[in-house]
Amino acid sequence: MRLVLASNNAKKLAELRALLGGLPLAIVAQGELGIAEAEEPHHTFVENALAKARHAAAAAAGAAIADDSGLCVHALGGAPGVISAHFAGEVAAQGDEGREDRRRRQDAANNALLLQRLEGVADRRAHFISTLVAIRHADDPEPLVAVGRWPGEILAAPRGTQGFGYDPLMYIPDLGATVAELDAERKNRHSHRARSAAALRTLLHEAWHLGA
């Protein structure tokens, strides 16, 4: 079964392919099919994930999966939340740079703003959240919704070179490392997306009768 991923994030695609490996699924990024990214106008992760999934499913005339994820910081009232990807405002393209180069500059700007907002704040509690939505077609009345949360705390300076986004600032006490200090295999065992993907695997089996 083909699932169109409503994202052009190469690292997110790789993560989901690994996390849902073994299921009879072929996950394809929407960009490979010429599908533009959807608007994300909502205030909640689940609403944005559903909007993205329906957009991709309609354009591909088939099944789709979407992940809306981000960082929620306790002292900031849940911010950056659904605007995690562009917390510092969307950075402008520079010359002929590629998507990943621009994403790295965006990540750096977001991290810098987060540290600025938390300067002098003692409560550094935060959690990553991933909301996965899978639908069989654009008008599917029964979307599968799975949520995963990964608690940690925000450091005062980045550590590590793996991952993307806020990974260098997110310290996981249980693992004694930031997310950016974890290799892909270890991250995929513990992450918010690992938790939502595990829940989604169960739903795919129970509702769509896929795999074991």
Image (spheres, helix red, strand yellow):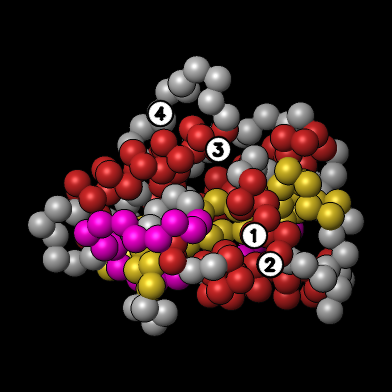
x, y (%) of residue 199? Answer: 65, 73
Q: Amino acid at mark 2?
A: Leu
Distance, label 1 to label 4, CA atoms, is 25 Å
Find disc 1 in the rendering and name its residue: 15
Residues 25 and 159: in front is: 159
What secondary structure is marked by label 3? helix
Find disc 2 in the rendering and name its residue: 19
What secondary structure is marked by label 4? loop
Which badge, 2 or 4, comes first in the chain's sequence?
A: 2
Residue 143, magenta (yes or no): yes
The residue sitting at 86% across, 51% down in the picture is 2
Q: Amino acid at mark 3?
A: Glu
Magenta part of the protein: which range?
A: 141-163
Sort mark 1 into few (<14), some (14-19) or many (20+) by Cα contacts within 10 Å.
some
Picture quarter with the C terminus = bottom right
Distance, label 4 to label 3, CA atoms, is 13 Å
Find disc 3 in the rendering and name its residue: 100
Residues 133 and 89: in front is: 89
Which badge, 3 or 1, comes first in the chain's sequence?
A: 1
Tag 2 near tag 1, CB within 8 Å? yes
Q: Is residue 206 shown to the viewer in this render?
A: yes
x, y (%) of residue 103? Answer: 49, 38
Distance, label 3 to label 2, CA atoms, is 22 Å
